[in-house]
Image: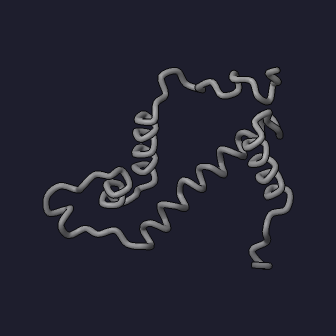
């Protein structure tokens, strides 16, 4: 028996033709928007920076930390946008993320208490 929770329709693509390679294009675009250094973009995408730029530029731990924070911020914003549509989801994992995001909104951490 197929219930709404297990229906294949909840897993249909949101955008026709979306592919894993297409997601790489999105990731690269987001890195450009976020002013991620070229050498870190190349490392992340599995590419090399050509010429002298690739010889003298190196990725630092702080660059990687900054890079990790940027998609995390995008994720948190996307959950807030999704909460505006509905506080729940028939997809259990998304429902859990939405519940967590809703709790963070209801009880934000005070800067003074940190």
Query: From what the image shows, is residue 65 above or below residue 91?
Result: below
Q: Residue at x 79, y 68 (%)?
A: 109
Quadrant of the image for the C terminus?
Answer: bottom right
Quadrant of the image for the N terminus?
Answer: top right
Q: Residue at x 62, y 49 (%)?
A: 75
Query: From what the image shows, is residue 82 above or below residue 107?
Result: above
Q: Nearer the viewer, residue 51 or 46?
A: 46
> In which image quadrant can residue 10 be found?
top right
Q: Position of residue 36 (x, y in %)?
A: 40, 58
Q: Residue at x 55, y 61 (%)?
A: 69
Tell me how the rendering is colored: one colour
Residue 39 horizontal side relative to residue 108, left or right: left
> In which image quadrant can residue 48 be found?
bottom left
Q: Which residue is at the far left? A: 51
Residue 42 horizontal side relative to residue 7, left or right: left
Q: Residue at x 40, y 35 (%)?
A: 21
Q: Position of residue 94 (x, y in %)?
A: 73, 42
Residue 50 horizontal side relative to residue 25, left or right: left
Q: Which residue is at the far right? A: 106
């Amino acid at each position: 028996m197929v219930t709404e929770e297990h229906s294949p329709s909840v897993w249909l693509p949101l955008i026709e033709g979306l592919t894993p390679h297409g997601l790489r294009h999105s990731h690269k675009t987001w890195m450009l928007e976020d002013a991620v250094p070229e050498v870190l973009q190349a490392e992340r995408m599995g590419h090399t920076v050509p010429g002298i730029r690739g010889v003298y530029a190196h990725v630092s731990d702080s660059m990687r930390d900054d890079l990790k924070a940027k998609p995390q911020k995008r994720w948190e914003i996307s959950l807030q946008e999704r909460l505006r549509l509905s506080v729940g989801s028939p997809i259990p994992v998304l429902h859990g993320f939405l519940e967590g995001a809703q709790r963070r909104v209801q009880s934000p951490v005070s800067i003074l208490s940190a």
